[in-house]
């Protein structure tokens, strides 16, 4: 098998594999893999050349990553996390939690989670100031944002003196982009690249929506030269193998492709839903609605981000 391709992640200067390990899929919000099992999959990806992992405070999978780090050369592996922290206190708590639970001396990338525009970044500026100080002290190597918004990318550009990385949603249909289409997103990414931002994309398969068009969907993102890396959520060795083959431009057997198509994930809402609507208010894709006093999902709109799951106190929502 040939080697994965590597790129420099913009201003962060990390040399990262074109394929990033999206770790939401192994977390309690999705497959809820036991720590050892999740760690084993991360290590397997690392041994096959994947050297960048995307996580978040929300995903609750730091224990899996900590376990994996025992078998990984720390300096050769880039961990990017993100959080909703908005001031010094919440940023301090979040950073200290990440350092402690990952049992590491530094975080490679710390992102403000789900930024919408320059205004939301400004609203989180106290957190950024603190994180920047921690960057100067070496606890963080780079700073950035994750976003589902074209204006989020444009907003980050306005803070290019302090931010290094943008983690935008990019896929062939533009599903999940909250304020525009895929062409507008790509134009914004081009502008960010001109400012030397490191760009690693999320949701190239549209949260599973494009799984039946896997090759076409991945060809689309792989041909975008501005993307230094592309995060794909993986839950098993089969998915990892498929992605490595695709990123190496190698042929994927019909058998493998069929198995992956069968693995299609979906959102499930349990019968004991009380119809409280908390999840509905949280979903920016408008994928949830009430019918017969219970929440239902429109899978044509859902990008499997998992954000709604945390809202449900009755643990009704699962990605299966
Ligand atoms: S938050 Fe839970 S209980 Fe409330 S509507 Fe959503 S799924 Fe139902
Ligand atoms: S329904 Fe839930 S998982 Fe699907 S897009 Fe909305 S918030 Fe994300």
Image: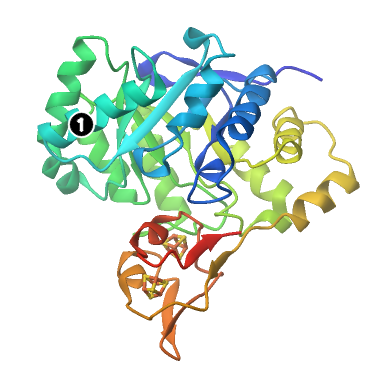
Looking at the image, which is closer to me, 82 or 92? 92
Looking at the image, which is closer to me, 41 or 116? 41
Q: Is residue 111 left or right of residue 239?
A: left
Ligand 1 in which quarter: bottom left
Coloured how?
rainbow
Which image quadrant for residue 292? bottom left
Seen at 55% across and 22% down, the residue is 68
Which residue matches tag 1? Answer: 93
Looking at the image, which is closer to me, 131 or 71? 71
Residue 133 position in % (x across, y down):
15, 17
Q: Is residue 16 visible?
A: no
Q: For the residue with label 1, is its CB less than 8 Å from the closest atom of ligand 2?
A: no
Residue 85 position in % (x across, y down):
21, 39
Note whether 292 is above or below 105 in the view shown: below
Seen at 13% across and 25% down, the residue is 130
Assign a secondary structure to mark 1: helix
Q: Is residue 198 visible?
A: yes
Q: Is residue 210 left or right of residue 263?
A: left
Q: Is residue 253 left or right of residue 52?
A: right
Quadrant position of the C terminus in the picture? bottom right
Which image quadrant for residue 311? bottom left
Residue 212 position in % (x across, y down):
73, 58
Residue 89 position in % (x across, y down):
11, 33
Seen at 44% across and 35% down, the residue is 55
Q: Is residue 120 left or right of residue 276?
A: left
Quadrant position of the N terminus in the picture? top right
Mark 1 is surrounded, within 10 Å at the Cα level, by few (under 14), some (14 to 19) or many (20 or more) other residues, namely few
Seen at 34% across and 15% down, the residue is 106
């Amino acid at each position: 098998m040939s080697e994965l391709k590597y790129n420099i992640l913009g201003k962060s200067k990390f040399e990262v594999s074109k394929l990033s390990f999206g770790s939401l899929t192994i977390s309690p919000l999705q497959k809820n893999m036991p720590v050892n099992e999740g760690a084993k999959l991360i290590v397997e990806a690392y041994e096959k050349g994947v050297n960048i992992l995307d996580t978040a405070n929300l995903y609750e999978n730091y224990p899996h990553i900590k376990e994996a780090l025992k078998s990984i050369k720390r300096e050769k592996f880039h961990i990017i996390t993100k959080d909703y922290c908005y001031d010094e206190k919440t940023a301090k708590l979040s950073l200290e939690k990440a350092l402690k639970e990952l049992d590491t001396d530094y975080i490679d990338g710390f992102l403000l989670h789900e930024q919408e525009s320059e205004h939301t970044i400004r609203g989180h500026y106290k957190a950024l100031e603190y994180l920047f100080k921690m960057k100067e002290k070496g606890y963080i190597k780079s700073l950035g944002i994750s976003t589902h918004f074209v204006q989020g990318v444009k907003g980050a550009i306005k803070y290019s003196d302090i931010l290094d990385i943008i983690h935008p949603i990019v896929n062939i249909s533009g599903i999940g982009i909250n304020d525009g289409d895929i062409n507008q997103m790509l134009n914004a990414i081009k502008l960010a690249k001109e400012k030397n931002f490191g760009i690693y994309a999320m949701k190239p398969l549209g949260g599973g929506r494009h799984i039946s068009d896997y090759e076409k969907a991945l060809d689309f993102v792989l041909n975008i030269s501005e993307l230094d890396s592309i995060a794909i959520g993986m839950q098993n060795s089969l998915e990892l193998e498929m992605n490595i083959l695709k990123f190496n431009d190698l042929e994927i057997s019909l058998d493998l492709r069929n198995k992956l198509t069968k693995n299609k994930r979906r959102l499930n809402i349990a019968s004991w839903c009380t119809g409280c609507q908390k999840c509905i208010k949280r979903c920016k894709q408008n994928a949830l609605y009430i019918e017969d006093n219970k929440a239902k999902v429109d899978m044509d709109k859902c990008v499997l981000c998992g954000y709604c799951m945390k809202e449900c106190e009755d643990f009704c929502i699962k990605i299966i």
